[in-house]
Amino acid sequence: MAASPPPVLGRPRLYRVIQGAVFVTMSVVIVLGFLREIPQLAIIEESARSLYFHVPMWFTLMGATLVSAYHSAQYLRTGNIVRDIRAREAARLAIAFGILGLITGMVWARFTWYEGTGKWWNWDPKQSMALVLMLIYGAYFALRSSVESDAMRGRIAAVYNLFAFVTMPFLLYILPNQMASLHPGADGSPALSQSDLAPSMRWIFYPSVLAFFGLFWMMYTQRVRLAVVEWRERASALLTPSR
Amino acid sequence: MTIHPVESAADVITRDTTWTETPMPTAEPDALEKVMTADGKIYVVVAVLLIVWIGIMVYLYRTDQKIDRLERRVDDSISEDR
């Protein structure tokens, strides 16, 4: 257990700069995403614009799991409670973005590849394995709430979190891309590689990914700050003899 | 599951049959499908963006709840100290 409570984080200049950048970038992405001309293809037609909002969900999830795993590793090294808080909040956002990715993917597929079939969920390898990844990260929180002691919970959760992170690339890329799947990128179907994505879409897609990274960072930082204050409050309540 | 370091004829057949076996639109489109596929399916993008927006709002709402809980705790300790 840390001898002194962790310092509060405050709201540094970098945070405010990113906040502004996210607001501007996201606004531009939404406007251009809807208005700019895109190549017309059968089946997906204008819905191809969902690329700007569905795919960044998964990029953000990957970023969030990376941040989470990094802080779990640092927690195991240092035992600093703030590392545990950071790992937890990043994992929470990974799940949030993953759920958004799953739902937006369901809606997109329903009216393109599954048009006329009435199917919302088809156990496509890409979506099933993304769901499995959500369950693996869900278990991280189940595991956390089952351990009483702070230090013990931090260590066990950190080790599990590193395991969960290792499964991520397999469940999102390696395995589904080896199987027959309707999802772009699987089994040689076009997706994001150099020749697949039209250059005009690239210049909206990449800023969109960056904007969602920034948004993740904002949401993550807010929760971490809150959790640190909460931790300090609990610690000071425990140390006050009158209570 | 097909693991193919080198693409053989068998793999190409597997992939091609996967695509041709994909169910073709057969069912009569329901009301929702008619709306969503109108105007070049642009409403799919609207729905996707709306879902992301709702997700962000739900997250903000839950942050608010956490702040509430913390405020109540801080306030309790103040009133007890007095």
Image (cartoon, rainbow, N blue to C red):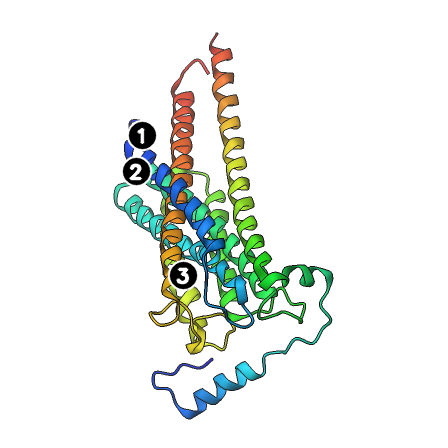
User: Circle 3 marks a residue in which chain?
Assistant: A
Task: Choose top left, top right, bottom left or bottom right for residue A20.
Answer: top left
- Mark 3 surroundings: few (<14), some (14-19) or many (≥20) residues within 10 A: some
Residue B18 vs B58, above or below: the answer is below
Dot placed on the residue nearer the N-terminal end, 3 or 1: 1
The x and y percentages for residue A242 are: 44, 13
Q: Name the residue under label 1.
A: A6
Which of discs 3 and 1 lies nearer the camera? The answer is 3
The Cα atoms of the two marked residues, 2 and 1, are separated by: 8 Å
What amino acid does circle 3 point to?
A: Met
Q: Can residue A220 be seen in this view?
A: no
Q: Name the residue under label 3.
A: A201
Q: Residue furthest top?
A: B82
The x and y percentages for residue A110 are: 61, 65
**Helix, strand or loop at mark 1:** loop
Is B68 on the left-hand or right-hand side of A239? Answer: right
Dot placed on the residue nearer the N-terminal end, 2 or 1: 1
